[in-house]
Amino acid sequence: MLTIALPKGRLMDRVLHLLKKAEIIETTGYAESRKLIIEDPKAKLRYILAKPTDVPTYVEHGVADLGIVGKDVLRESERLVYELLDLGVGKCRMIVAVSQQSNLIQIQELGFSAKVATKYPNITTDFFRSHGIQSEIIELNGSIEIAPIIGLADAIVDITETGTTLKENGLRIIGDVCSISARLIANHASYKLHYKELQDILEKLEEVCE
Ligand code: PRP
């Protein structure tokens, strides 16, 4: 039986619909259950419904053979896993934003004295370093958009999908970090040991991914 780690939360519905379209699962009802492990003996598959940030951990440690997770979480985790496929769902951008009232126009104006709040300290450090910028990074776990409003940071690095959260909190984009979407990832050993089964799932998903 293969184990697939799925991300609970905002990606879940889109991922379940994709798995159903690919005829890997029969129902999208998993999201309504409070069960954290769901078995499908007929398909010889088991699903772990995980916190998105834990999906790469499960896959790296081999307790899940496959996982589905956003590229933001995957890059930030720096876990050693294979990235097999861009599923094309959960598309959004990772951006740098400041308050509408800020004088900052471009990221190069952020310097030693600037504070940047983010859920993604690794990605932010890499991105700023590649642009020769060294700012203080303040790690938060959510509601990042609050930081400039309450004076905790001069800028934020966060994901935006519709742009509503930025707009409603009076923030303006000054830089683009990368584009994000959901990825299929695999454990290194599983990829070799269960190559045929993993390839079968990969091909089914390739046919339906957007
Ligand atoms: C994400 C992100 C933004 C918001 C952007 O937060 O951190 O806050 O979505 O979406 P929008 O552009 O469509 O408004 P999430 O809902 O995952 O929760 P969080 O604030 O706890 O990270």
Image: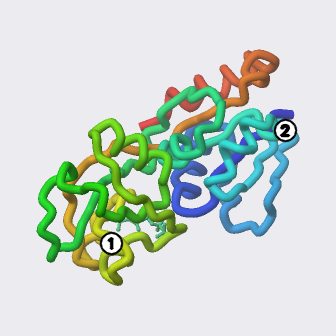
Q: Amino acid at mark 2?
A: Lys
Q: Tell me, yes or no, whether the two marked residues, 2 and 1, touch with CB atoms within 8 Å.
A: no
Disc 2 vs disc 1: which is toward the camera?
Answer: 1
State which quarter of the image contains the N terminus. top right
Q: Quadrant of residue 56?
A: top right
- What percent of the width, then of the height, locates residue 62? 80, 35
Q: Establish if 31 lies above or below 5.
A: below
Q: Amino acid at mark 1?
A: Thr
- Is 38 on the left-hand or right-hand side of 10? right
Label 2, secondary structure: give it: helix
Identified at 63% across, 59% down, the residue is: 8
Q: Establish if 82 lies above or below 157.
A: above
- Is 150 on the left-hand or right-hand side of 66? left
Q: Which of the two residues, 165 or 148, is positioned nearer the viewer here?
A: 148
Identified at 72% across, 55% down, the residue is: 49
- Which numbered tag is attached to residue 42? 2
Tell me which numbered mark, 2 or 1, is placed earlier along the sequence. 2
The quarter of the image that holds ligand 1 is bottom left
Q: Which of the two residues, 30 or 121, is positioned nearer the viewer here?
A: 121
Q: Residue furthest bottom?
A: 150
Question: Alpha-carbon distance for marks 2 and 1?
Answer: 42 Å
For ligand 1, tell me if the residue under mark 1 lies within 8 Å: yes
Q: How is the image coloured?
A: rainbow
Per the image, the residue denoted by label 1 is 165
- What percent of the width, then of the height, locates residue 61? 79, 37
Residue 108 appearing in the image:
yes
